[in-house]
Amino acid sequence: MNRRFVPILLLGIALLLTATACGDDPFRIQWSENPAEATLYAMDRQELNRPSAFDMLQRRRVVLESPQTQGRWDFALDRQGGALVFLPPRALGVTSSAAIAPMPGVSFEDLREAPSDTTRYITREPIPLQAGNTYVVRTHEQRGRFGQICTHYGKLEVVSLRAEDGVLIFRHDTSPECNSRRLIPRND
């Protein structure tokens, strides 16, 4: 081992031990709940360049017609049979790990953890929307803080939908923790 490297290695170990000795995890992501509202427009509306998809982790609306989207979104809004539906990316032929789990009868506040049962997540079919219903969203894969591949989990609640206008307003929040199904921050 290079002798100049040894002091740097020892200093790094000492810093890591000091941080963990104080009970702090240097890799833990500190976050707070921060629900926000967003509005999407159905894909079948005549206007171009209206946001009809959403990226949960980045908390941004996406215009599907834009060449910059490249599958970096988690669901789109469409109108089928006169009703509004979510479309996961795979329902539109986009390769993605994004999926949605409807959570009937569970309030936004009571959603504390995403389901571990992968069969509850819909990846290829339209998901009908109803006012007041809640959904868990598993995001598309993306690079985490330390370069690893992550999916994130978020929750959303339909606040208002106007099928006749093709407009959806929803409340959402997403955990920034890589591959964690927790939908609320840790209290410890």
Image (cartoon, rainbow, N blue to C red):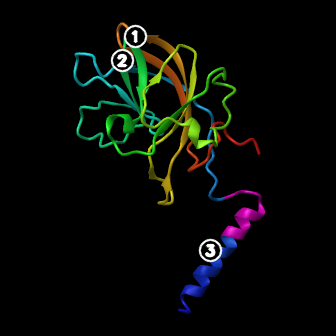
Q: How far is mark 1 from mark 2, CA to CA?
A: 7 Å
Read off the residue under disc 3: 12
Read off the residue under disc 2: 79
Front one among 84 and 185:
84
Residue beneath the point at 55% across and 35% down: 154
The magenta segment: 16-25
Residue 80, percent from left and from top? 36, 17
Left or right? Give the position of 20 relative to 165.
right
Residue 23, percent from left and from top? 77, 58
Determine if the magenta segment contains residue 24.
yes
In this picture, is 141 found above or below 27? above
Badge 3, how many Cα within 10 Å: few under 14, some, many 20+?
few
Residue 183, percent from left and from top? 63, 37
Residue beneath the point at 54% across and 37% down: 121
Q: Quadrant of the C terminus?
A: top right
Q: Earlier in the sequence, mark 3 or mark 2?
A: 3
Left or right? Give the position of 7 relative to 162.
right
Residue beneath the point at 58% across and 23% down: 134
In this picture, is 51 found above or below 118? above
Q: Amino acid at mark 1?
A: Ala
Query: Main SS of the magenta segment?
Result: helix
Q: Amino acid at mark 2?
A: Arg
Residue 163: mark in rendering:
1
Q: Amino acid at mark 3?
A: Gly
Front one among 21 and 157:
157
